[in-house]
Image (cartoon, rainbow, N blue to C red):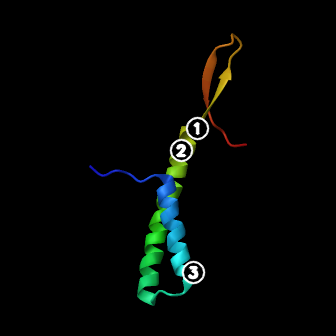
């Protein structure tokens, strides 16, 4: 069973990849590998954010004072 990494862990890895690439110390081959890895991390983070946004809902009260859930809609 594979444990999924958290958004924070993936973002930290992405930041480290960017730092390494910006240092200028990588060979072209290593820079391309880091770029590919960074793109995967970026997609993973964006997918997690998208899934999370879809889960967000607003709790509101109806006329009788009962709580009801409504999907989050970006204005």
Q: Position of residue 52 (x, y in %)?
A: 53, 44
Percent position of residue 57, x then y = 60, 33
Q: Which residue lies under the disc numbered 3? A: 22
Q: Are marks 3 and 2 in contact (CB under 8 Å)?
A: no
Secondary structure state at the residue bearing disc 2: helix
CA separation in Å, label 3 and label 2: 30 Å
Which residue is label 1 attached to?
56
Distance (Cα) linking label 1 and label 3: 35 Å
Above or below 47: residue 16 = below
Residue 42 seen in the figure: no
Q: Residues within 10 Å of mark 1 (few under 14, many from 20)?
A: few
Residue farthest to the top, as pictured: 64
Q: Earlier in the sequence, mark 3 or mark 2?
A: 3
- Camera-side mark, 1 or 3: 3
Q: Nearer the viewer, residue 51 or 3?
A: 3
In the displayed structure image, the side of residue 4 where residue 73 appears, left or right? right
Residue ID at (41%, 87%): 29
For the residues bearing labels 2 and 1, Cβ distance under 8 angstroms: yes
Q: Quadrant of the C terminus?
A: top right
Q: In this orientation, which residue lies closer to the viewer: 7 or 47?
A: 7
Q: Residues within 10 Å of mark 2 (few under 14, many from 20)?
A: few
Looking at the image, which is closer to me, 67 or 17? 17
Which residue is depicted at the point 56% across and 83% down?
23
Q: Which residue is mark 2?
A: 52
Query: Eyeballing the image, is 15 above or below 53?
Result: below
x and y, in percent, of residue 32 in the image: 45, 82
Task: Tell which tag, 3 or 2, sits nearer the viewer.
Answer: 3
Q: Image point 50% across, 73% down: which residue?
A: 17
| Residue drawn at the location 55% of the way across and 42% of the way down | 54
């Amino acid at each position: 069973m594979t444990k999924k990494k958290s958004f924070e862990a993936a973002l930290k890895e992405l930041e480290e990849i960017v730092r390494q690439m910006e240092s200028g110390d990588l060979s072209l081959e290593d820079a391309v590998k880091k770029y590919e890895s960074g793109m995967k991390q970026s997609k993973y983070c964006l997918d997690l954010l998208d899934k999370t946004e879809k889960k967000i809902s607003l709790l509101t009260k109806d006329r009788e004072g009962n709580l009801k859930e409504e999907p989050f809609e970006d204005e």
